[in-house]
Every structure is written in structure tokens, then in C-alpha cells.
Amino acid sequence: MRPALRRIKKVLVRTPGGRHVWHRVKKRSRDRCGICGSELHGSRRDRPRGDLCVSCSRTLMRKKVM
Ligand SMILES: [Zn+2]
């Protein structure tokens, strides 16, 4: 198997014709901040959490307080 294809996740799918075919599963991109668009650290891919990074949420909280 080619090294580039080793990490691709595959799922066995039944076609309408009754055949079983391996389908490639697209990787989900990392969660990104809603304001600045940077990658969120410590967010698990299967559990959706907050959508802002640390610095953006901090500035938002400061604006709310002021
Ligand atoms: Zn941000």
C-alpha cells in the first residue's frame, strides 16, 4: 500500500447493486476561532465546544466588563 494512502480512513459501503465498496472518509478539519480564525487548542473533534480562541474570548469579556 502506498504510504500516502495508509492514513486514509475507509468505510465499507453497500452499493445499490449489492456490491461492497471501500469508501474514503474525509478528515474533519480542526475547529477554528469564529473571530480570528486560528486553530482551537484542546478541542476534541467528536465533541463540539466553544467556538472562540483564548485571546478573543478574553478581549470579549473585557469589553463586556468595561
Ligand atoms: Zn480568536
Image (cartoon, helix red, strand yellow):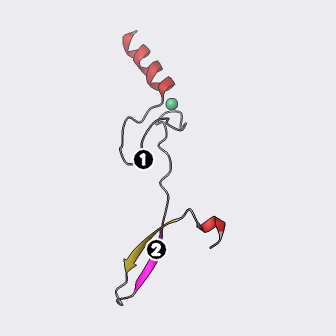
Residue projecting furthest to the front: 1
Q: Position of residue 59 (x, y in %)?
A: 47, 19
Q: Main secondary structure of the magenta part?
A: strand
Query: In x, y percent, where is residue 57?
Result: 44, 24
Q: Is residue 8 above or below residue 16?
A: above
| Residue ID at (49%, 40%) | 32
The residue to which callout 1 is attached is 45
Residue 59 falls inside the magenta stretch = no
Hey, what amino acid is under mark 2?
His
Mark pair 2, 1: CA separation:
21 Å
| Along the line of sight, the residue nearer the viewer: 61 or 6 | 6
Q: From this view, report whether residue 44 is shown above or below residue 2.
A: above
- Tell me if 2 is positioned left or right of 44 in this view: right
Residue sitting farthest toward the top = 66
15 relative to 50, above or below: below
Is residue 46 rendered to the left or right of residue 55? left
Vertical comparison of 16 with 49: above or below:
below
Say which element carries label 2: strand
Q: Which residues are magenta?
A: 20-25
Return the residue at label 2.
23
Residue contact between numbered discs 2 and 1, judged by CB atoms under 8 Å: no
Quadrant location of the C terminus in the rendered image: top left
Horizontal relation, residue 50 to residue 59: left or right: left
